[in-house]
Image: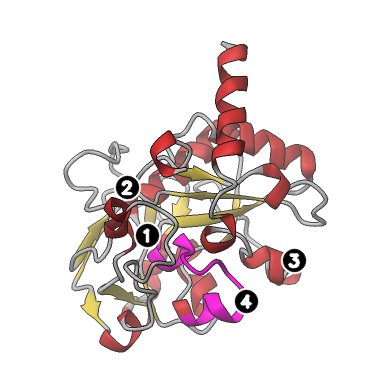
Amino acid sequence: MKLLWGFVSLAFVVGCEEGKKILDQGEEERVVEEPAQVPTEPAGGENDGSDDAIVPAPQTPASSPGIGPTDPPYTTEVTFPSGLHLAGLGTVSALTATYPDPASGLLPFATSRQRHYAPVEYFIDIRSLSDSQRERRVATNFKLNEYVRIPERNGDHHIYIDAEIALHAQQLRDAWGGPLVLTSTFRSPEYNAAIGGAFFSRHMYGDALDIKANDETMAFDLYNLAKFLEVSFLDAPENTIVGRNTPWLHIDDRGWPLNTPDTR
C-alpha cells in the first residue's frame, strides 16, 4: 500500500507541473500573507453549543442528489452538506462578464474541459445574509460566515460557495481531528487579478480553499491526509509548503482529477 501511494504521489507531482502558471500559481498567500487578519476564533472549531437549535443534517456524499451541480454557471440555489439550503441566488451580469473565456485558447486543457470553466452566473449576495444565517453551519464544524467573511473583507459583495468543497473541508477537518483555519475562499476575478492569482484560479468559481498550517509539519500532515479525499486538485508541497513562512494547503474541486493522463 505504501508503495502504491508513493507512486500516486509521484504521478501527481509530475502531472500537475504543466499549466501551473495559468491554473494555480500565485495563490493569495503567495502574494499577501496576512497573519494579523487570521480569525481570532479558529475556523472549523468545535460546536460550542451556541446554536443548539440548529441541528446539522447527516453528511451527504457530494455525488448525492441535493448537493447541487458541481460546475458553473451553477443554479439559483445551493444545498450544503449540513442541509443548509440557500435559495434565490441572483445574476450579476457585470460580474459574470469579468470571468476569463475558457474558449480563448489560454486554458491548457482539452476542449472537453472548457465546461468546467464556464463563467459563474448565479451568486450569493453577502449583504442579504442576516447575522443568524451567517452563524448557520454549512458542515458540522464550519459556519457559513467562515466562507463569507474573507471575500467580504476583500471587498466582494457577491460570491459562490460550492457544496462539494465544503464537504471536503469537513472531511479533512475530521481526519485532522481539530480546528482548521480557512485563509482563502471565493475571489472575484477582479480581486484575484489584483493579488496576482492564477488566470483560471478555481477560487473564482467558489470550489477552492486555502487552509492555513501553523508550521511545515502540520502542512505536510494535512497534505498527506488530503490525498485520501476525492478532491480534483491538491497543490504540490513545493508551491505551498516548502520554504514558506506561513505554509498552507490548496484544494479544489474543478470537476476532474488534474493528475490523470488525459489532462497532461
Please state which amino acid type lies under the numbered disc 2.
Ser
Looking at the rendering, the stretch of residues picked out in magenta corresponds to 190-206
**Do the numbered discs 3 and 2 sit on residues whose CB atoms are within 8 Å?**
no
Q: Secondary structure at mark 4?
A: loop
Nearest to viewer (mark 4 / mark 3): 4
Please state which amino acid type lies under the numbered disc 3.
Pro
Q: Earlier in the sequence, mark 4 or mark 2?
A: 2
Residue that badge 4 annotates: 195
Q: Earlier in the sequence, mark 1 or mark 3?
A: 3
**Do the numbered discs 4 and 3 sit on residues whose CB atoms are within 8 Å?**
no
261 over 201 or under it: above or below = above
Q: Nearer the viewer, residue 138 or 94?
A: 94
Mark 2 burial class by Cα count in 10 Å: few <14, some 14-19, many 20+: many
The Cα–Cα distance between marks 4 and 3, rounded to whole angstroms, is 16 Å
72 over 235 or under it: above or below = below
Q: Which mark is residue 136?
A: 1
Q: Secondary structure at mark 2?
A: loop
Question: How far across and how far down the image is residue 14, in percent?
Answer: 60, 37
